[in-house]
Amino acid sequence: MRNKIKIILLIICVSLLMLGCGNPAKEHLEQGDTYADNGQWEEAIVEYSKAIELDPEFALAYYNRGLAYGKKGDLDTAIADCDKAIELDPEFVVAYYNRGIAYHTKGDLDQAIADYDKAIELDPDDAKAYNNRGFAYYVKGDLDQAIADCDKAIELDSEFAWAYGNRGFAYKEKGEVAKAVSDLEKCVELSDDPAVVEWAQQILDELRQ
């Protein structure tokens, strides 16, 4: 009887020990996130790579490593990591969104728009995807579609400073100065990013000359 009790207690202790042990892959992911939060991209990539080595199907680790590579300017590797994250999780909305940003930065606007399309399909309330797709259409010269996408982004998030700025820029290109000024003033009012405020203010100053 005593031996049975000892065995049961041993099983309980082992089970509790196993529960108390962390997931090593997740621990590396979290350490990578800490490095990423501090802008230490190389260190973050090392930790994310360790997480992937331990768990080759860890979609979030591929995605986060892709973000880190993107921050370093290695867009092809960033895209490859987003590709893998999407392969593992076809409904990984932000992976499509950020892969779209990487393609946009590379100048592949059609592929960027395709990724923003997919992000919107999976999450129709993604204001950032509408805004970014609008900017891509602006760069392609489709100003009406750019404005329509910014309209939707603002409908979803009435305090989205960038969306007002991008729509104002499109109105400026269309020669609709009053609408451009209104949107850019709203962008300046809402944004807490000095770079965005400076950008919008410069365009406002040009329009007011």
Image (cartoon, grey):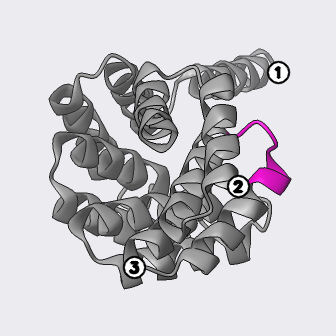
User: Which one is in front in this view, the residue at disc 2 or the one at disc 1?
Assistant: 2
Magenta-colored stretch includes residue 163: no
| The one of 55 and 152 positioned closer to us in this rendering | 152
Please tell me which residue is depicted at 65% across the width and 18% down the height of the picture: 13
Which residue matches tag 1? 1
Magenta-colored stretch includes residue 155: yes
User: Which one is in front in this view, the residue at disc 1 or the one at disc 3?
Assistant: 3
Secondary structure type for disc 1: loop
Task: Say above or below: 100 vs 158.
Answer: below
| The one of 55 and 192 positioned closer to us in this rendering | 192
Three-letter amino acid code of the residue under disc 2 = Ala
Mark 1 or mark 3: name the one nearer the start of the chain.
Answer: 1
Which residue matches tag 3? 140
Asked whether disc 1 touches disc 3, contact meaning CB atoms under 8 Å apart, the reply is no
Mark 2 or mark 1: name the one nearer the start of the chain.
Answer: 1
Q: Identify the magenta region.
A: 154-160
Which residue matches tag 2? 127
Three-letter amino acid code of the residue under disc 3 = Lys
| The one of 161 and 87 positioned closer to us in this rendering | 161
